[in-house]
Image (cartoon, rainbow, N blue to C red):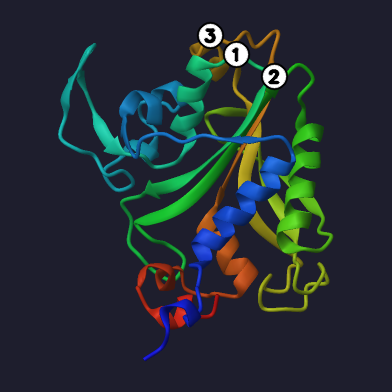
Amino acid sequence: MNNPSETPIHVHPITRVVNDINRIFFDMGFTLTDGPEVETEYYNFDALNVPKDHPARDMQDTFWLKGGKHDAGVKNFLMRTHTSPVQIRFMEKHQPPFRIICPGRVFRNEATDARHEALFHQVEGLYVGKDVSLASLKSVLNKFFDAFFEKDVDIRFRPSYFPFVEPGVEIDVSCFKCNGEGNCAVCGGGGWLEVMGAGMVHPKVLNGVGINPNEWRGFAFGVGIDRLAMLKYGIDDIRLFYSGDLRLVNQF
């Protein structure tokens, strides 16, 4: 029988990636914050400028819970679909400038396959200050991805739409396997990998938490932790993270 002191310790790849993300952003001056996984409709959607008729509110995308009483009356409760509510809760209680990250579990009511799970992990970042711009966002993300993939990578912005940012962008990174040459299976020959959504915090969101958008500006970004782990470690099925199969964990 093995001596317990001689048994190797294995860290789950999701935990490993979360630790890497925290360390990298801590080095850039970000602090860690978190919030509840059971959220209200207000924090998950309304405070983030998500329209009442937005598809994300549908039963097909959201796990809705039975309503309950709150100070202001009846609230609609749900399992958070992103970690953005943490940003709202933080901004309600703090005055800028600040820079935070909020990793955690999120929940989507969708069919599972090799790339989708009903439960997965996400990290979002928020930076609010006086002279914050898309150039600031690009600089921060360049430093993050260089450190995370342990090599120089390029990033590019593509216009996109998210209700809580304006303008919104999709972030691509040059493929870290083929160095952007487009000759590998990871990037599918395109040379770029789509990794996250981001943008400048919408003025309505800042107004809603009592921050003057004429005085302060901010950027926000969100990325799937599971997606980063799959890319970094060459794992092709997200379901492996939650299978409990020690053959995966024992590789780390």
Residue 203 visible in the shown view: yes
Q: Quadrant of residue 242?
A: bottom left
State left or right for residue 245 relative to residue 16.
Answer: left
Circle 3 sits on which residue? 210
Q: Quadrant of the N terminus?
A: bottom left
The image position of residue 141, as x and y in percent, is 74, 45
The label on residue 217 is: 2
Q: Quadrant of residue 125?
A: top right
Q: Are marks 2 and 3 in contact (CB under 8 Å)?
A: no
Q: Earlier in the sequence, mark 2 or mark 1?
A: 1
Q: Residue at x 73, y 54 (%)?
A: 145
Residue 167 visible in the shown view: no
Circle 1 sits on which residue? 95
The image position of residue 86, as x and y in percent, is 46, 31
The relative height of residue 182 versus residue 16 in the rendered view (above or below) is below
Q: Earlier in the sequence, mark 3 or mark 1?
A: 1
